[in-house]
């Protein structure tokens, strides 16, 4: 195995430094664990207490491994060998197809133009490395595809070629020769112009231009497509092409023009009315003339294998993203159960310990506004810490916790702030536990009433006070009227007592004389 860019291995220092930092962070987190503080993870609907360190303390090993594999992929590992053919000097072949309307004649099946396309495709299938171009010509000529080793471009052009491809009709060989001279390069490779036509020319001034082809070493291979008997030319509308006298035009193969083109340049002529192997014709033409320096050799190169470490590296990064990065939780309200459903039995110390863990979390999670310079929540947090460290709690402990919660809440209400609901609910649960353990150890109803008062909002409490102040005059009047009624009743009772006492004094009558 070799690496194309081994200098990039220095980038492995990045994941190495990252892993070192992760292990150092994990050691610091393990050293700061408090065994008496319960840890919990927030779920979708509740809190789950855990006995092992949180997942955020785990080292991100998958992240480091993924980055290291990506660095290895950047160095381009290579193993295995593959042979590729390289052509030292390619021949240049320019194919010229006649697109005049006479090429639509069907004396050669399926038509002259379709036979030219088939011969071109068969030649492209047997060429290996030659530079091939395509010229279309009729009344004018156009370089359809420059010389290139990409044969797929030519295969895409061939099906769409037709007489309507060029704006001017007829067969102008001079325009073909001039376009071909401009298309060939200036190298020393063998150059060939393959002309596929029926030989019918509309002018005869191409001889001077053909001599220029010979000077540049360009040989013409002429392929005559058609028959001496000829055929009529379809006009595309179901009829045939007619001349100015109204007679149907009969198109025949004119091989003399094509033979003269080939002889002037030292090329060759073949009759393509029947099928022929154009590759063999080209080979014979090369052997008859100067053989080009066309060499083919195989080179060996190493196969790129960066895909494997890159794929595994991306997979490790995906695993790291799913399991090693903490989820950023969204704010949500976790509804706690009612006091009755959360009240554990005294005989189950495990449930009581779980409840104390919730009290501790609530005490440590007080809002920052409730912690002044004197820290009014410190006594409450101290009591919670002391109770969580003990295995058994008495009724007095629950009463002390409830009393301190009432004091803490009243201090917050004095500052015209809302008391957090969680600690107060926990204190109400503590009141229920203490009342079950010893109903006479504290005034539990009074504590419950004070805690429920803390749950009232400041606006509601202020409204109740205003309502009470408005009712005081009426209550005072009612009290005065009741006092007056009581006074009147007492006066009436005294009068009745006096009226009943006077007849008693008259019971002793004076003696009457006899």
Image (tube, rainbow, N blue to C red):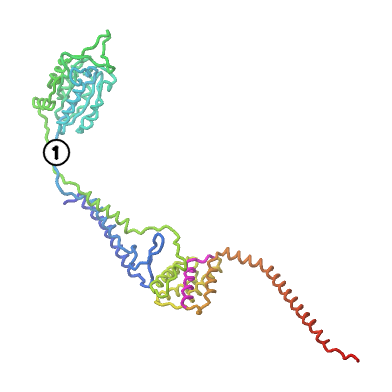
Position of residue 375 relative to residue 514, above or below, is above
On the rendered image, what quadrant is the C terminus found in?
Answer: bottom right
- So how many labels did they put on this image? 1
* Residue 428 seen in this snapshot: yes
Query: Could you say which is closer to the camera, residue 339 or residue 19?
Result: 339
Query: Could you say which is closer to the camera, residue 264 or residue 280?
Result: 280
Q: Residue at x 29, y 54 (%)?
A: 317
* Residue 21 seen in this snapshot: no
Q: Outermost residue, left direction?
A: 288
Q: Quadrant of residue 11?
A: bottom left
Horizontal relation, residue 298 to residue 21: left or right:
left
Q: Is residue 418 magenta?
A: yes
Q: Quadrant of residue 321?
A: bottom left
Tell me the residue that label 1 is attached to. Answer: 85
Instruction: Please provide the residue range marked out in magenta.
Output: 417-437
Q: Secondary structure at mark 1?
A: strand
Q: Position of residue 398 (x, y in %)?
A: 47, 75
Query: Could you say which is closer to the camera, residue 201 or residue 465?
Result: 465
Q: Position of residue 102 (x, y in %)?
A: 22, 17
Position of residue 24 relative to residue 169, above or below, is below
Q: Residues within 10 Å of mark 1 (few under 14, many from 20)?
A: few
């Amino acid at each position: 195995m070799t690496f194309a860019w081994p200098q990039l291995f220095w980038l492995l220092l990045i994941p190495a430094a990252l892993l070192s930092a992760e292990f150092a962070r994990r050691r610091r987190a393990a050293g700061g664990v408090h065994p008496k503080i319960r840890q919990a993870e927030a779920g979708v609907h509740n809190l789950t207490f855990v006995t092992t360190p949180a997942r955020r303390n785990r080292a991100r090993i998958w992240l480091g491994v993924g980055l290291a594999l990506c660095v290895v992929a950047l160095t381009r590992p290579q193993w295995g060998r593959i042979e590729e053919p390289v052509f030292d000097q390619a021949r240049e072949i320019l194919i010229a197809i006649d697109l005049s309307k006479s090429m639509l004649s069907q004396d050669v099946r399926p038509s002259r133009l379709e036979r030219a396309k088939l011969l071109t495709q068969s030649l492209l299938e047997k060429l290996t490395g030659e530079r091939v171009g395509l010229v279309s010509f009729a009344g004018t000529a156009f370089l359809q595809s420059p010389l290139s080793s990409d044969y797929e471009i030519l295969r895409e052009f061939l099906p769409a070629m037709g007489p309507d491809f060029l704006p001017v009709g007829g067969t102008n060989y001079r325009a073909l020769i001039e376009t071909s001279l401009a298309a060939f390069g200036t190298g020393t490779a063998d150059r060939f112009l393959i002309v596929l036509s029926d030989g019918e020319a509309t002018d005869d001034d191409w001889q001077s231009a053909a001599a220029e082809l010979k000077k540049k070493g360009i040989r013409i291979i002429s392929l005559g497509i058609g028959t001496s008997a000829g055929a009529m030319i379809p006009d595309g509308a179901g009829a045939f092409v007619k001349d100015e006298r109204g007679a149907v035009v009969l198109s025949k193969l004119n091989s003399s023009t094509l033979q003269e083109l080939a002889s002037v340049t030292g090329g060759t002529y073949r009759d393509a009315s029947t099928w022929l192997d154009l590759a063999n014709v080209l080979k014979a033409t090369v052997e008859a003339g100067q053989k080009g320096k066309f060499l083919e050799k195989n080179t060996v190169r190493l196969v790129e294998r960066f895909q494997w470490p890159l794929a595994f590296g991306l997979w490790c990064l995906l695993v790291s993203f799913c399991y090693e990065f903490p989820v950023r939780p969204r704010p949500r309200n976790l509804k706690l159960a009612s006091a009755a459903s959360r009240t554990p039995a005294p005989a189950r110390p495990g449930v009581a310990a779980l409840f104390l863990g919730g009290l501790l979390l609530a005490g440590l999670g007080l809002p920052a506004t409730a912690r002044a310079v004197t820290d009014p929540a410190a006594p409450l947090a101290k009591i919670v810490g002391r109770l969580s460290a003990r295995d058994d709690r008495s009724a007095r402990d629950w009463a002390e916790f409830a009393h301190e919660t009432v004091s803490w809440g009243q201090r917050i209400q004095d500052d015209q702030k809302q008391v957090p609901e969680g600690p107060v609910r926990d204190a109400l649960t503590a009141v229920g536990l203490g009342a079950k353990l010893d109903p006479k150890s504290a005034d539990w109803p009074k504590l419950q009433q004070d805690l429920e008062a803390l749950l009232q909002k400041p606006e509601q409490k202020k409204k109740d006070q205003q309502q009470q102040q408005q009712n005081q005059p009426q209550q005072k009047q009612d009290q005065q009227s009741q006092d007056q009624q009581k006074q009147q009743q007492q006066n009436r009772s005294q009068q009745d007592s006096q009226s009943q006492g006077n007849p008693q004094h008259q019971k002793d009558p004076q003696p009457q004389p006899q």
